[in-house]
Image (tube, rainbow, N blue to C red):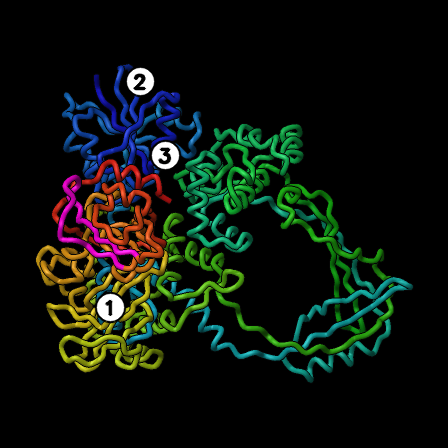
Amino acid sequence: MRTVLMVAEKPSLAQSIAKILSKGSCSSRKGLNGACSVHEYSGSFQGQSVRFKMTSVCGHVMSLDFIGVEARGCDVVVLWLDCDKRERTSVLDAVQPVMSKPGGREQTVFRAKFSSITDTDIWNAMNRLGEPNHNEALSVDARQELDLRIGCAFTRFQTKYFQGKYGNLDSSLISFGPCQTPTLGFCVERHDKIQSFKPETFWILQAKVFKGKESALTLDWNRVRVFDRDVGQMFVNVAKTSRDAKVESVSKKEKSKQRPQALNTVEMLRVASSALGMGPQHTMQIAERLYTQGYISYPRTETTQYPENFDLKGALKQQANNPMWADEVKELLSSGLNRPRKGNDAGDHPPITPMRSATEAELGSDGWRLFDYITRHFISTVSQDCKFLQTTIEFNIGGEDFSCSGKTLISPGYTSVMPWQGIPLEEALPVCERGDVFTVDEVKLVERQTNPPEYLTEAELITLMERHGIGTDASIPVHINNICQRNYVTVENGRKLKPTNLGIVLVHGYYKIDAELVLPTIRSALEKQLNLIALGKANFSQVLQHTLDIFKRKFHYFVDSINGMDELMEVSFSPIAASGKPLSRCGKCHRFMKYIQAKPSRMHCSHCDETYSLPQNGAIKLYKELRCPLDDFELVLWTSGSKGKSYPLCPYCYGNPPFRDMKKGFGCNECTHPSCAHALSSLGIGQCVECESGVLVLDPTSGPKWKMACNKCNVVVHFFEQAHKVQVSSDSCDTCDAALVDVDFNKSRSPLPLGQTQHSGCVFCDPVFQDLVELKHATMRHPMHRGRRGNPKKPKDKMAALAAYFV
């Protein structure tokens, strides 16, 4: 029997698609990587009985060994990669070399095109399989390679250069990106306009008139404003020559407010930020969850026009019983749908559409708010336009023209489901006609000032990025999130993006050295070339090489001219020697080194002019003034808090591994020194009960709430609370090969049987310790590494007991 391998982009998608195609009869198992499941079932493919294997890549992965193993011996591969350009080439590169060789020219690679996780869409995709688009994959490969090579080169250079000179940059990475940097440039450009803004005083004429006993009517001056007070006063004097306001004309015009175009990604992100207060990255995460759960169609699309064969009525019927909009939907189904406005067909996916009904209880707060908007937007696209009557009355007072206008609702149309876009209620204008005369109540000169622009909102930034071709619908949220994460901008009230000193200095520095590094022009031109690759109209290698040649020259010029940016840095940031507080002694000069807490946290010896890296996302303390036996540096303690994990480390060894089997970033809990009292050989207890390569290491500073923590994953084991002393013995357990532990309790608090105060045993196997051990996860993750005693055996029975305590 032939085997068909099907690959989805995410494990949840693979599970949903397999469930639909197998009609719920598939069997599931964990894949060889332990993360991505494999769903198997028998069925028919191109008229033959076959065995289907459905699996996934685990996110956008760099290594696809797992997929290659699962593909071994398969005859056909079907890509279910969200109909998106990403990952296809990588998956095929991993799969095709190990597949069975076809006879003749038989097609063995297929692509499923789908836009929602519904039975109909999935079966339609399966019955209409096509071929992967090689040009689209090349376009993505070019974009990824260019962004990676250009970004890494600039980022590595400026990070090392500036973090070695300044102590309070407060950013773990001084990154550059061909899309990220122009995105920051938009924010700083607005900041510069605000800073350079000089308010101007202007004057307007304000007139109030009334007729009979009716309330006064405030009129707008048709000249709008003047910037010379004397001129404004002259017009006031002219208008005051008459006590009558003569009606020159009354016009009534029926107008309409157009229903929205169908929803694409960029518009969804704009509205989510401006109206729902949700950041773009968060919005996309929620949208993708709604999609994988089958509530909405694929959320990454540039298209704002439904195809002719799209079942609008079927999608609308799904919402007919939802009490939030049931009345409006039933009315539309009864009276007939209005054809959606013509929009842009980008040829990717249909607009974002609700696929089934939902409630807030099902989706949660943010999920419901986004789904609510998506659904209301969809209903609006098939509703009538909002219609209103606009009335304008023109007045003349002493030769000066004034006017007032008002709107009266005729038909709410789509605003009945999007009420925030409705016509606001206004006080009705008085009934009058040409030639009527009103009495002037007052005419006065009002002084006002021009206002500076406000900081860019996320919604405005998204618009600018789309307009200038910076990023794609999928990557725009990532670029905005990056400039926030790098501490280049902060998100203020109203989702406004305010640049930090670091962000401002970087952009001004780029302008000073090479403005094209921050302007959107080069990236916009590159995106056009990448789109031509996708269409088969441009050569992949030529575009790649030409762009790399341009940026290579720009990089060398940037390196040679870095002093121009450094001059700006000097004004805004403190030298590293003047930053931080003394903490521990240097092993070279034995003087105190300073601990610099601002990101990235590090130690600096001003006497030796050396800087030493430290673990991030935690606190650093002095470790009992103890020294490393290898280099005489005082040890420091990294901790993620009382509920997390802690371990000592040598500042020098952390960045300069002393042994071949150690890597940069190892603490003492991974050090393979054979006799050091702080090393793995002295404090390691046994293999982690959860991960394969980690070792549980005693935290000697944790008493009286003692614990051991894995030096690879975030497992923490609490044990022997209130013990006076806990030590790791040199003896090993006969059952599991873990190190024995010597425990000493105070007599008044001993939980040991028969009032004993001391006991030595295995924390995994000893029944005396059975109730004194509890497994938890640390509140913060930190990458840690290799263990003690090679590969000790996992204690089977005790592991099961520990797992029962897992939280």
Magenta stretch encompasses residue 631: no
Please name the amino acid that badge 3 sits on. Answer: Leu
Q: What range of the chain is rendered magenta?
A: 725-745
Tell me the CA gap for discs 2 and 1: 61 Å
Image coordinates for residue 588, horizontal then vertical, percent: 13, 77
Q: Nearer the viewer, residue 327 or 144?
A: 327
Q: Residues within 10 Å of mark 1 (few under 14, many from 20)?
A: many
Front in this rendered view, residue 656 or 131? 656
In front here: 533 or 184?
Answer: 184
Which numbered tag is attached to residue 43? 2
The three-letter code of the residue at mark 2 reads: Gly
Task: Please identify the quarter of the rendering in which residue 403 is found.
Answer: bottom right
Asked whether the viewer can see residue 485, the reply is yes
* Quarter placement of the N terminus: top left
Mark number for residue 13? Answer: 3
In primary-sequence order, the first of circles 2 and 3 is 3
The quarter of the picture where residue 447 lies is bottom right
Camera-side mark, 2 or 1: 1
**Type of the residue with mark 1:** Val
Q: Name the side, left or right, on which 732 lies relative to 175.
A: left
Residue that badge 1 annotates: 636
In terms of secondary structure, where does tag 2 sit? strand
Give coordinates of residue 22: x percent, y percent: 36, 21
Nearer mark to the viewer, of 1 and 3: 1
State the SS at label 3.
Answer: helix
Q: Residue at x 16, y 59 (%)?
A: 679
- Return the x and y of residue 539 as percentages of the image width and height: 22, 47
Label 2 Cα crowd, 10 Å radius (few <14 / some 14-19 / many 20+) = some
Compare marks 1 and 3 and give the one earlier in the sequence: 3
